């Protein structure tokens, strides 16, 4: 996401309501089997599909992964898609480092790290953290011994070797390198019986490719929650509501209740008993997890093109993340304050999204007084953080210095680095 869009640019941004994007009635996923040495089904790789055509048009890996997760849990259901088998999901760096991953039950998923991901210490730490949570990690599209492969081997579990791209004369050395690290070998793009025989002789444990099956395209009717309802729910979640309050709001959004129950049924939560009420479902999932899910639905609502090209959506996402990061620096360890800052970032731009005045939006929603003062008067810590966000977006030194004077915990360089981190997210 770009951080170079300033608030003054919003005058040229048309509200989304003036250019409605038709939301497809159905959603789609590709599913390709992964077999073991006996020929038995071991897992499925889940692939982004935009329609019934059995290929993907992907220009943004993070968007594609968010769509896969949203469709898998929210629209289709994990049981219907995977049954009792393991799921493989492609992930880029942005998704690996985000909380989106936590929506998946770790024991059910292998995270396939794309070959384009650059390895560093931060990613190494994150990979080890995810493995401690129970995820298994695979490195995708390996065809040769490379610095990237050697760097990743200590923190992954499975190596997927591209059987088409790897020269056969180099295969034994590549296999020996992987085996020295005790990793599982998966042969992908196995296209012919001869490929399968060669992979069996080479000692691969798992196999995937057109020789066994092309990806199957699954479809399901889309479960849609209105943007208004999601925004109201985000406001409520930012208030640290009682379970009864959240239950009342969720009952107004039947589609979201369906998605919540599917999230529970996904296996992400080890259920000790049958869920018999919405209240029990809320208690089991937890408000933070529900907040993450609502945010994912808000920003991955089937309008992938808007996510990539709409400057308002980009700015809203970047500002929200900046506010959350800055709040963490202002009040370390205060999760409620960080949540309030994040929601303040969302609502500071929602009036443009709906094409109305910000006061009109604020008047229709039960926003906490601190957030209200930040939005309308730029008062309080949240108001100062919002000023800092807009200063960074403008790129102008005077507003940035003024923001630092109001928030002495930050230097201009600190704000610039937070802006870059938010933009990368």
Image (spheres, grey):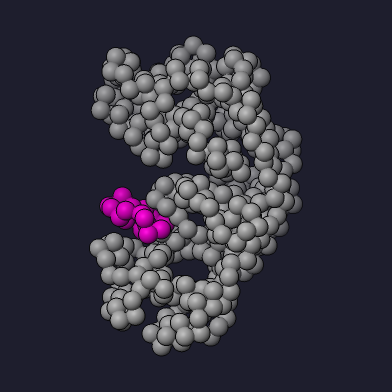
Work out whether residue 331 can be spotted: no
Q: Position of residue 263 (x, y in %)?
A: 63, 52
Work out whether residue 60 can be spotted: yes
Q: Find residue 394 and report its image quarter.
A: top left
Q: Position of residue 42 (x, y in %)?
A: 55, 75
- The relative height of residue 165 versus residue 374 in the rendered view (above or below) is below
User: In this rendering, would 217 be left or right of 411?
Assistant: right
Q: Is residue 123 magenta?
A: yes
Residue that appears at 28% across and 53% down: 120
- The relative height of residue 384 versus residue 201 in the rendered view (above or below) is above
- The relative height of residue 240 versus residue 97 in the rendered view (above or below) is above
Q: Find residue 204 and report its image quarter.
A: bottom left
User: In this rendering, would 257 be left or right of 267?
Assistant: right
Q: Compare residues 289 and 401 and report the one nearer the observer.
A: 401
Residue that appears at 41% across and 40% down: 425
Question: From which residue to which does the magenta span run?
Answer: 114-130
Residue that appears at 71% across and 46% down: 25
Q: Compare residues 212 and 185 and report the one nearer the observer.
A: 212
Q: Compare residues 25 and 46 and report the one nearer the observer.
A: 25
User: In this rendering, would 157 be left or right of 11?
Assistant: left
Residue that appears at 44% across and 17% down: 8
Q: Quadrant of the N terminus?
A: top left
Q: How many marks?
A: 0
Q: Position of residue 380 (x, y in %)?
A: 44, 16
- The relative height of residue 46 versus residue 11 in the rendered view (above or below) is below
Q: Position of residue 345 (x, y in %)?
A: 48, 27
Q: Is residue 372 magenta?
A: no
């Amino acid at each position: 996401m770009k951080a170079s869009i300033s608030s003054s640019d919003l005058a040229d941004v048309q509200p989304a309501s003036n250019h409605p994007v038709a939301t497809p009635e159905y959603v789609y996923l590709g599913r390709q089997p992964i077999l073991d040495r006996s020929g038995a089904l071991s897992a499925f790789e889940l692939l982004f599909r935009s329609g019934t055509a059995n290929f993907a048009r992907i220009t943004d890996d993070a968007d594609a992964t968010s769509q896969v997760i949203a469709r898998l849990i929210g629209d289709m259901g994990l049981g219907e898609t995977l049954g009792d088998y393991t799921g493989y999901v492609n992930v880029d760096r942005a998704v690996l480092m985000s909380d989106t991953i936590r929506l998946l039950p770790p024991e059910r998923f292998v995270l396939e790290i794309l070959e384009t991901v650059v390895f560093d210490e931060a990613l190494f730490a994150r990979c080890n953290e995810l493995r401690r949570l129970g995820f298994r990690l695979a490195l995708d599209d390996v065809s040769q011994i490379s610095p990237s492969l050697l760097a990743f081997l200590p923190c992954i579990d499975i190596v997927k070797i591209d059987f088409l791209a790897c020269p056969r004369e180099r295969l034994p050395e590549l296999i020996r390198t992987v085996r020295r690290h005790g990793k599982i070998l998966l042969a992908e793009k196995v296209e012919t019986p001869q490929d399968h025989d060669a992979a069996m002789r080479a000692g691969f444990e798992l196999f995937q490719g057109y020789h066994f099956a092309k990806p199957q395209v699954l479809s399901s009717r889309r479960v849609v929650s209105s943007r208004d309802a999601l925004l109201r729910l985000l406001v409520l979640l930012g208030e640290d509501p009682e379970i009864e309050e959240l239950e009342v709001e969720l009952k107004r959004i039947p589609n979201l209740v369906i998605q919540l129950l599917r999230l529970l049924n996904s296996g992400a939560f080890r259920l000790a008993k049958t869920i018999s009420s919405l209240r029990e479902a809320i208690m089991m999932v937890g408000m933070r997890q529900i907040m993450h899910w609502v945010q994912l639905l808000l920003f991955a609502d089937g309008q992938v093109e808007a996510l990539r090209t709409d400057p308002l959506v980009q700015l809203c996402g970047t500002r929200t993340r900046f506010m959350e990061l800055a709040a963490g620096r202002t009040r370390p360890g205060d999760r409620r304050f960080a949540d309030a800052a994040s929601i303040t970032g969302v609502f500071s731009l929602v009036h443009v999204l709906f094409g109305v005045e910000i006061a009109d939006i604020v008047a229709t929603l039960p926003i906490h007084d601190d957030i209200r003062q930040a939005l309308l008067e730029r008062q309080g810590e949240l108001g100062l953080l919002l000023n800092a966000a807009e200063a960074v977006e403008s790129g102008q030194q005077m507003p940035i210095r003024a923001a630092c004077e109001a928030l002495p915990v930050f230097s201009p360089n600190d704000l610039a680095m937070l802006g870059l981190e938010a933009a990368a997210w």
